[in-house]
Amino acid sequence: MSSSCIEEVSVPDDNWYRIANELLSRADITINGSAPV
């Protein structure tokens, strides 16, 4: 994941994030590092 928009933000590698990332990816939405946790 070198070409990612996330640089200094620690991304939670949990199931919910993977599911959300998949759904948003299919919706043509890019997740930035400023996502509310």
Image (tube, grey):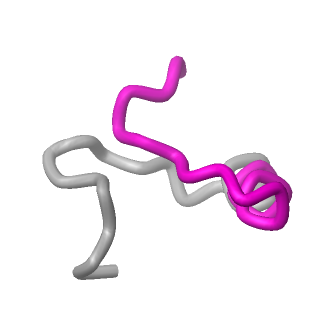
36 relative to 12, above or below: above
Give the x, y percent position of residue 7.
17, 53
Q: Image quadrant for the N terminus?
A: bottom left
28 relative to 1, above or below: above
Q: Residue at x 53, y 21 (%)?
A: 37
Outermost left residue: 8
Q: Residue at x 77, y 49 (%)?
A: 20
For the image, the number of numbered tags is 0
User: Which residues lie in the magenta part?
Assistant: 20-37
Q: Residue at x 50, y 48 (%)?
A: 12
Q: Is residue 21 left or right of residue 10?
A: right
Give the x, y percent position of residue 17.
67, 50
Whether residue 29 is in magenta: the answer is yes
Whether residue 27 is in magenta: the answer is yes
Res. 14 image quadrant:
bottom right
Give the main secondary structure, helix, strand or loop, of the magenta stretch.
Answer: loop
Outermost top residue: 36
Res. 26 image quadrant:
bottom right
Outermost front residue: 28
Residue nearer the viewer, 16 or 22: 22
